[in-house]
Image (spheres, rainbow, N blue to C red):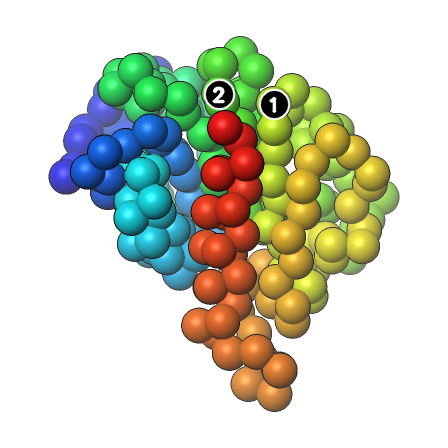
Amino acid sequence: MIEIVETDAGTARITWHKAKQARLVLAVGHGAGGGIEARDLQALARVLPEHGVTVALVEQPWRVAGKKVAPAPKTLDTGWRGVWPALSGMELPVISGGRSAGARVACRTAAELGAHAVLALGFPLHPPGRPEKSRAGELLAAGVPTLVVQGGNDPFGKPEEFPDGDFGLIEVPYGDHGFAVPKRAEITGERALEIITDGVVEWIASLG
């Protein structure tokens, strides 16, 4: 089911993948370089409804408008705030999530929006090759239970680069920023997706 939502940043779009007896909603936004067709987002939308989690794939207004370049973080946050009433309208706890830039949005807005938890897929800890430009503060300030899922070879921040903090971290071995693994890797691309979905299912169950 597709829902159109008007926000102060423009028209957003939610694609719902509903569980039959939902106990939670996982809302996930895309990154700055792609949309909800990302393999990890599609895998979560396919698997989680079987575990009682409705998945809402959120397209930011800039993406709906067909623009190639994402706007400033402040505008992304405005778009996310604008869709939140639709996400929380079922009166179920909402996990705020996203990949890459979408993960940063989820972290920055979690506390104010009353998110149940945060799922950060491919959190861009720093620009590639610029570890001094750390965005760890956004992650550490989320203020709610947080899970990071990170590729072992992510140029935006490898798992070992993350600071100690009150968050969980799942590593996808050999994975890049989009969790793709090279052909010579010891795991397949399908196994990489299973690591993501299995880990998220287990984490959500632990939230209570």
Q: Amino acid at mark 1?
A: Val
Q: Secondary structure at mark 1?
A: loop
Q: Give the labeled residue for mark 1.
A: 144
Q: Are marks 2 and 1 in contact (CB under 8 Å)?
A: yes
In this orientation, does residue 62 appear? no
Relative to 149, say whether 14 is above or below. Answer: above
Residue at screen point 52% across, 67% down: 192
Query: Which label's residue is closer to the chain start, 2 or 1?
Result: 2
* x and y percentages locating residue 84 in the rendered image: 36, 20
Q: Is residue 205 left or right of residue 182?
A: left
Residue at screen point 62% across, 82% down: 186
Q: Quadrant of residue 92?
A: top left
Q: Secondary structure at mark 2?
A: loop
In the rendered view of the protein, which quadrant contains the N terminus?
top left
* x and y percentages locating residue 151 in the rendered image: 63, 60
Residue nearer the viewer, 105 or 167: 167
Residue nearer the viewer, 143 or 30: 143
Q: Give the labeled residue for mark 2.
A: 115
